[in-house]
Amino acid sequence: MTTATPPPDTVLIVEDDPHVRLGCVQAMQLANLAVVGVGSAEEALPLLAQGHIGAVVTDMRLPKADGLSLVRLCQQQDAHLPVVMITGHGDIDLAVESMRAGAYDFITKPFASERLVDVVRRALEKRQLTREIARLRQQLHQGDDIESRLIGQSQAMVAVRRLILDVADSPVDVLVHGETGCGKELVAQALHAASPRRKGPYVALNCGGMPDNLLDSELFGHEAGAFTGAQKRRIGKIEFAQGGTLFLDEVETMPMSMQIKLLRVLQERRLERLGSNAPIDIDCRIVAATKDDLLERGRQGSFRSDLYYRLNVVTITLPPLRERRDDIPLLMAHFTTAAAQRFNRPPPELSGAQLAALMRHDWPGNVRELRNVADCLVLGVRHAVLDQGHSAPAPAAVGLSLAEAVEHFERELIAAELARQGGNMTRAAEALKVAKTTLHDKVRRMGLGPQP
C-alpha cells in the first residue's frame, strides 16, 4: 500500500485496472503534475487524510467501496477537494449522481490522455483559487499584510508587491502612477505598514481643488496672525507626518508656487511655517501619486521637471484592472466578503454568467468600480455590469466554476485576438500584453493553434 507523504497538490489516481492506472499516472507525469496511483478507495483514504491531495481521479467501478462512495468520503473530509469521475458509457446515470454528490466533473471511457490532463488542470486551478479566496477571507479577519492590501496573483501585482517590499525599509520618496481607482493610496499604506515608520503617523492629503493659501497652510502650517483668520498656530501635514509617511494624492494639480516650496522641503528636509522664520527639521517619507504623465506635464510647463525628478527616485506603476483580469475573481471575493460584514448580509455566490460579465467589462473606474459592483451584489441592488450577466450571458460560461469561467474567458479572448491578427503570434502577444512564450504555451494547452 502506498502511504508515503505526497508533495502538495498531488493528483491521486484511484483505478483498480493496473494498465489504465499506469496510463493515467504517466499522462500526469508527462504534464509535469505530481501524481500517485492506488488500486482502491481503501488505499486512497490514508493519502487523503494527509491533506496533500489537490485533485482525485477515480473510476466509478472499484472493488469494495465504489467511486461514488469515494466522492462522498472526499466531501466529508474536504468539501472543496475536486473529484473527477471516470465512467463507462453505461454509467451516465451514476455519473450524474456523482455530480450531485459533489464530484467536480466526469469523463467517459475511452478517453484521450490530453482530455484527462485538461480536466485535471482545471480541477487543480479551481482548488488553488478556492484556497486563495479562503486565505484572503482569513486575512480580512486577522491580517494586515501586503497581500491583504494589494490583492492579485497576476504578474503585474506580484511585481508591485515585490517592489514595495524592496524599498519599504529605505527612506527614499516614492512616486505612484496609475489610473483613477487603481488603488494608489493602498500602495502608500502598504509602504507605510511595511516600513520602519509603521509606528509613526500616516497622513494623507489630496492636492486637488484647494485654493493656494489653504493648501499652503495644510502642507506647511502657519503661526498665529500669519494671515487674516489665522488666530492660532497650525501644524501642517508635512510636520504632522514626522517619523511617518505623507501621502500626496493628485500631486499633478499642485499649483506651481506650492511645487517650488515642496521641492525645497524635499531637498533640504526642513520647512518654515507661514509667518515664521524658524526652520523645522523634517523626517517623513513622501509618497506622491498621480494619474498623469508628469514628465510630459513638465515639457508642457504645467509641472516642474526638477520636482518630477526629485519625486521620481522610485516609481511604482499600478496596472489598470482591464490589464489584470485574472485578479477579478479574487478581488470580487474579497470585496463581497468585506461588504457582507459591513452590511451584515451573507456573502453571495457569483454565478458563471455574472463572472463572465465581470471579465468582459473594461472597468474604466478600475478596482474602485469593482468594489461598487460588489456592494450592489451584496445588497441585492441591480447594477449595469451585473445585468450584462443576466441579459447577455455567455452561454458556454453559464454554470461554470470561477476557475472554469476564467479559463473560458481567457480562451475566447486569445482566440479573438489571434483571429484579429491573422494568426500572427507576435502581434497577438503584444496586443494581449503577455510574453510570446506564455502565449505559445496557452495556445498549445488550449488547442487553439494548428494541430500536429
Image (cartoon, rainbow, N blue to C red):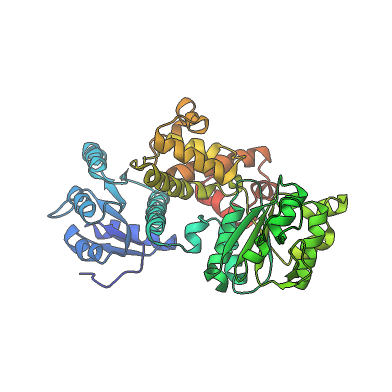
Height in image: 133 above or below 172? above
Q: Indicate the quadrant containing the N terminus: top left, top right, bottom left or bottom right.
A: bottom left
Query: Viewed as shown, does residue 113 lie left or right of 40?
Result: right
Residue 59 visible within the image: yes
Q: Position of residue 335 (x, y in %)?
A: 45, 46
Q: Which residue lies most toward the top here?
A: 391
Q: Position of residue 217 (x, y in %)?
A: 71, 56
Query: Viewed as shown, does residue 97 lie left or right of 29?
Result: left
Q: Position of residue 320 (x, y in %)?
A: 62, 48
Query: Viewed as shown, does residue 164 lie left or right of 409?
Result: right
Look at 36% across and 40% down and name the residue there: 349
- Dividing the picture into quadrants, the one containing residue 232 is bottom right
Look at 20% across and 53% down and name the residue there: 76
Question: Residue 159 or 380: which is nearer the viewer?
Answer: 380
Residue 351 visible within the image: no
Look at 48% across and 41% down and name the residue there: 408
Question: Residue 24 or 127: which is nearer the viewer?
Answer: 127
Q: Position of residue 264 (x, y in %)?
A: 80, 66
Q: How many marks?
A: 0
Height in image: 136 above or below 50? above
Question: Residue 212 or 62: which is nearer the viewer?
Answer: 212
Q: Which residue lies most toward the left here?
A: 64
Height in image: 10 above or below 279? above
Question: Residue 426 or 169: which is nearer the viewer?
Answer: 169
Look at 49% across and 31% down and name the residue there: 383
